[in-house]
Amino acid sequence: MKRLSIVTVALSLIAVGCSSSSPATPTSPTKPTFTATLMPANEVPPVSNAESSGSGNVTITFDITRDAQNNITAGTATFVVNLNGYPAGTPVNIAHIHQAPAGTNGSIIFNTQLSAGDSTILTNGAGSFTKAGIPPSGGLPIMQQILDNPSGFYFNVHSNLNPGGFSRGQLVRVQ
């Protein structure tokens, strides 16, 4: 019994001596994710016509690669958009990320590549679409800017009735 105790103590001391005291280096996730709640009232100016009654959400997931200095060297995004409560037959013909804070309109910096010829029709006033593997139209630096300040960007969707946008929401990072 005494021998077993000595061996146990010796193994414990060896294990403590072999352990590293340096903390693990934190790493950025390679798939940061953002959401936005899409509301007609968030558009500037707020939507007040037939498309003012709906709502929706978007989840945007970046798939990024970084170099040893943590710079983004490649990246794409996946957009998953869900909309409901709009007039039946509403066409979603454009969707993208703009750079601007809430209450301000900004320029398009990341297009989903949804176009008028590829529009999604909200049958019965609801629908969804996914666009995957989309490179940033504003270049890789825009991905870092979104990572650094997601609330400085918004996502919105456009229709024939509201070509300036009918539902909008500021980005929020969730992962």
Image (tube, rainbow, N blue to C red):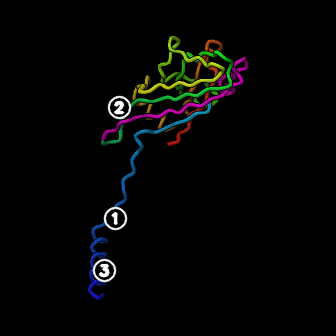
Identify the residue at image location x=51%, y=22%: 108
Residue 15 left/right relative to 94? left
Q: Earlier in the sequence, mark 2 or mark 1?
A: 1
Whether the residues at callouts 1 and 3 have beta carbons within 8 Å, the answer is no
Q: Nearer the viewer, mark 2 or mark 3?
A: 3
Q: Secondary structure at mark 2?
A: strand
Seen in the picture, residue 60 relative to 46 is either above or below; the reply is below
Instruction: State the image quarter where residue 136 is shown.
Output: top left
Graded by Cα atoms within 10 Å as few (under 14), some (14 to 19) or many (20 or more), the crowding at tag 1 reads few
Identify the residue at image location x=52%, y=29%: 80
Which amino acid does the dot numbered 1 rest on? Ser
| Distance between mark 2 and mark 1 Cα atoms | 34 Å
Number of dots carrying numbers: 3
Front in this rendered view, residue 151 or 79: 79
Identify the residue at image location x=29%, y=71%: 15
Which amino acid does the dot numbered 3 rest on? Val
Whether the residues at callouts 2 and 3 have beta carbons within 8 Å, the answer is no
| Distance between mark 1 and mark 3 Cα atoms | 20 Å
Residue on which disc 2 sits:
74
Give how far across and how far down residue 58 sits, in percent.
56, 31
Identify the residue at image location x=63%, y=23%: 126
Q: Earlier in the sequence, mark 2 or mark 3?
A: 3
Q: Earlier in the sequence, mark 1 or mark 3?
A: 3
Residue on which disc 3 sits:
9
Seen in the picture, residue 113 relative to 142 is either above or below; the reply is above
Q: Is residue 122 magenta?
A: no
**Highlighted range, magenta:** 38-67
Q: Nearer the viewer, mark 1 or mark 3?
A: 3
Q: Secondary structure at mark 3?
A: helix
Residue on which disc 1 sits:
21
